Amino acid sequence: MNSLIRLELVRALRNRKFLFFSVIYPSVLFLLIAGSADDTTKVDGTGLTLPTYMMVSMASFGALTAVLMGNSERIAKERENGWVRQLRLTTLPGRGYVLAKTAGAAVVSLPSIVVVFAVAATVKNVRLDAWQWLALTGAIWVGSLVFAALGVALGYLASGDAVRPITMIVYFGLSILGGLWMPTTTFPQWLQDMAKWVPTHAYAALGQSIEQSQAPHARDIVVLAVFFALFTGGAAWLYRKDTLKA
């Protein structure tokens, strides 16, 4: 399994397009959204400045891009070209394959988080305590496993041709409804109420609570835990179903 994880990392690091969209693109979006905001521009209902708020949102968006887009398309293509079937002939258990995919994507997501933080600190002068930087990195990194599991599930749900549009719909839907591109306080009230139960909203809220030196909201933790269970359970079921068809 360790060899498979190393292979996944090498393949991801060689994919320049993937690296651009997962590492550079979130930082560019951060500068476009928060570039003209000053230190006094506050996001309603949070007490955070717009640059500080969007720093967590874009770091979360970058991690989401790395684990969701990378996993789903690669798995779907590997199923079509027979690579997954070949792996089943080895001693690697099915759970090892899923774990390797999840772990490999999670490792690649770390640079996207760090780059957004570095840009926010140097360009927009975002300042936090040392423990907050560490806690933010850990929370966003660990939280990305929820969406890595979703990426595995999507990779087994659709074929190589269909997986991209399905993943893009899920990807943009989660990003917009979760408030990663704009604060949910700008939404109509009915949409704000709905967004509270979207996993990406809970994901970004963990980081925002750390920025405010507050404990995470219990609802956000429950939402992420429930969706993680659903996504991993769905990925495991789809993997077994795909195995029976092979």
Image: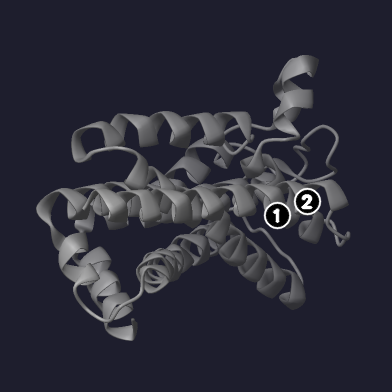
> Horizontally, is 104 left or right of 129 in the view?
left
Q: Mark 2 points at which residue?
A: 222
Q: Considering depth in this image, is 8 or 95 the residue closer to the camera?
A: 95
Q: Considering depth in this image, is 142 or 78 the residue closer to the camera?
A: 78
**Crowding at label 1, few (<14), some or many (≥20) Cα neighbours within 10 Å?**
some
Q: Name the residue under label 1.
A: 225
**Percent position of residue 139, x then y:** 66, 65
Indicate the secondary structure of the residue bearing disc 2.
helix
- Does residue 30 lie above or below 140 as drawn? above
- Residue 185 seen by the camera: yes
Give, as a three-letter code, the residue at label 1: Ala
**Percent position of residue 2, x then y:** 34, 84
**Percent position of residue 199, x then y:** 65, 43
Q: Residue at x 28, y 77 (%)?
A: 4
Confirm or deny contact between disc 1 and disc 2 (CB under 8 A): yes
The residue sitting at the front extreme is 244
- Residue 151 seen by the camera: no
- Does residue 118 lie above or below 155 as drawn? below
Give, as a three-letter code, the residue at label 2: Val
> Horizontally, is 235 left or right of 78 in the view?
right
**Percent position of residue 227, x then y:** 64, 47
**Crowding at label 2, few (<14), some or many (≥20) Cα neighbours within 10 Å?**
some
> Horizontally, is 81 left or right of 229 in the view?
left
The residue sitting at the left extreme is 81
Instruction: Indicate the quadrant containing the N terminus: top left, top right, bottom left or bottom right.
Output: bottom left
- Does residue 121 lie above or below 154 as drawn? below
Q: Residue at x 82, y 32 (%)?
A: 44
Real-space Cα distance between discs 1 and 2?
A: 5 Å
Mark number displayed over residue 67: none
Q: Which residue is drawn at 30% across and 57% down?
A: 19
Indicate the secondary structure of the residue bearing disc 1.
helix
